[in-house]
Image (tube, coloured by chain):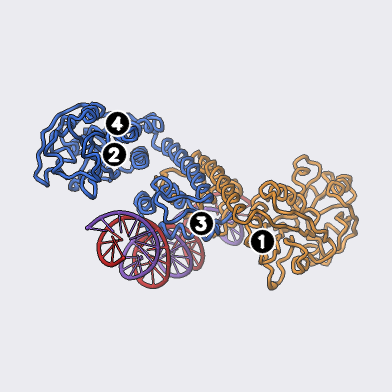
Chain colours: A orange, B blue, C red, D purple
Amino acid sequence: MAQSPLEIRHLQTLAALADTGSLGRAAERVFVTPSALSHQLKALETHYGAPLFERNTKPLRLTQAGQRLVTLAREVLSATAQAEREIAQWVSGGSGQLRIAVECHTCFDWLMPAMDALREHWPEVELDLVSGFQAEPMALVEGGVADLAVIHDRPAARPGVVVETLFRYETLGIVSPRDPLAARPHLQPADFTERTLISYPVDEAMLDVVRHFLAPAGIKPKRRDAELTVAILQLVASGRGIAALPRWSVTPYLERGYVVGKPLGPEGLSCELYAAIPESLSGKPYMRDFIDTIRGGA
Amino acid sequence: MAQSPLEIRHLQTLAALADTGSLGRAAERVFVTPSALSHQLKALETHYGAPLFERNTKPLRLTQAGQRLVTLAREVLSATAQAEREIAQWVSGGSGQLRIAVECHTCFDWLMPAMDALREHWPEVELDLVSGFQAEPMALVEGGVADLAVIHDRPAARPGVVVETLFRYETLGIVSPRDPLAARPHLQPADFTERTLISYPVDEAMLDVVRHFLAPAGIKPKRRDAELTVAILQLVASGRGIAALPRWSVTPYLERGYVVGKPLGPEGLSCELYAAIPESLSGKPYMRDFIDTIRGGA
DNA sequence: GAGATTTGTTGAATTCTATTCATGGCCCAG
DNA sequence: CTGGGCCATGAATAGAATTCAACAAATCTC
């Protein structure tokens, strides 16, 4: 009825803006340039005759009107997603399978909630984890043993397999609060020479720190293993060495001051995660839903 | 997140489709050609991989998927309208006035609910009825005495006043169920010669039947007045004459079989209602809201 | 039952709108 | 004051949605 220029696209923008706190990051979340969002927002603001957010404030602050639209966006987007899921289930019969291969330990932190959401939304989809820490996850997808592999580096394109980027994350150097390094603004590769690197029991080639930070600098620290994240942090906290973990897996500990997280290098070390999936499944609604959940929740 | 082609525009289409039961009428409700809607719907159907409605059924029937989307549309559109109202009220202070001039008695049937809705959504807007049955309503708007005039014929454009079309309606010939005319498929002007035309106590020039049906045929029946719609129907039911009223004002009586409604002429007689409003108010959110309410509720 | 009318569909053309691109301004850090 | 991060702006492009015009199906009428 009311012909307002408001469209769902705008609501996605608003939601992304609220989530990311920055126009630039919101833009990459909805796969457009920041410019596009700037135009969108300007159009909305002139239409409503009011600003939607305060510019020039680092964690972007929304005005009352902006806030209201974000609330609307949350309602509308979740209602829409729900409706579309239902329809997709009627159409496809709701069945399917999703066997997931992961090569990184920490991934379970975000993978579990996403799997829970999938189980809830798509009860008829068979959900499995493929134990594939040793093998090349990509090969599992190619071989038809897995339906989704989480991988660190964008691999070469292979026929029948599509690769989608999931999200970008920062891996932090983790040091004890009593370590002198805790006072540094960021860590250098050289800082690792004197200490023990505490990590999961996997090949060095699998560790972000080693591949993208220490190896390029020619540094090869002593290593010590632990199976669980808490165990690693325990060792770090008691001064037995330093670790390097994705930010998401340690935020609760950082907040409690149990350990301290430092950027690796002046720019920080950020890596990207990808999903490899068989082309035949890449369009399936439950697959899209799952990937969107991962992207949104991270 | 999910990049579905579904947009609010589509939801408006779906809602209009469900309301009107016909693609053509839905199209004019959202101010596009039927072709556009056909394209829209086809796109949605191929996206969801399922038909949304059954074609070739007179009151257009929705499939399960279509029904679900209509439900979604209702939710989303009302949530959106609500949010936009709130924002508009913050921006404008919510105040304003709306003095309405009406020249037709029956209009109150749909005007009252619309006014109630406005009072609820915009408590700060002063709502008034301008007693202007005698004067030219258009002049009341031009003179700044009224903010909205409901009129029957699209008047010549005047500076500072905009005219918007509200909706189209059919005026039916109303006859007693025991009248021989009740068996006819439709009424002819000549049918009025033998009987008394029962109507509101207004000038003949104001009556749709006279102007668009009887006068062109040179027929000038006897008249009898009644102030209220029920009184007119009472007289008709007891065989004292026939009337001509908009369909919306008599549907409850038709359903109960109290009287019978017949199209006037083989094509029926359909008139259009317009709103004249000062240009300065035509963009005001409460005005848009009011007009949309009228259009949607009719 | 044949023609006419209403109603919806289709593909191509058009028009419109959103996005991108390239540039410039602003603010904070060093 | 200078450089980089971040957003804004205007023109150009690319992409989509709408319209147009012609057609198909179904219904109504005679």
What is the secondary structure assignment of the residue under circle 2? helix
Query: Is C6 or A35 nearer to us in this picture?
Result: C6
Q: Which residue is mark 4?
A: B258
Asked if both marks, 2 and 4, belong to the same chain, the answer given is yes
Determine if residue B273 is in view.
no
Q: Quadrant of residue B34?
A: bottom left
Q: Nearer the viewer, mark 2 or mark 1?
A: 2
Image quadrant containing the N terminus of chain A: top left
Q: Nearer the viewer, mark 2 or mark 4?
A: 4
Q: Are marks 4 and 3 in contact (CB under 8 Å)?
A: no
- Mark 2 and mark 4 lie on one chain; the one further toward the N terminus is 2
Q: Which residue is found at the position 51% from the left and 45% from the top?
A: B72
| Amino acid bearing label 3 | Pro
State the CA–CA distance, disc 2 to disc 4: 14 Å
Residue C25 vs residue B23: left or right? right
| Amino acid bearing label 1 | Thr
Q: Which residue is mark 1?
A: A165
Query: Is B136 or B220 nearer to us in this picture?
Result: B220
Asked if both marks, 4 and 3, belong to the same chain, the answer given is yes
| Amino acid bearing label 2 | Arg
- Residue A131 horizontal/vertical position (percent): 83, 59
- Mark 4 and mark 3 lie on one chain; the one further toward the N terminus is 3
Q: Are marks 4 and 1 in contact (CB under 8 Å)?
A: no
Q: Which residue is mark 3?
A: B51
- Residue D22 horizontal/vertical position (percent): 32, 70
Q: Which residue is mark 2?
A: B247
Q: Quadrant of residue B182?
A: top left
State the CA–CA distance, disc 2 to disc 1: 59 Å
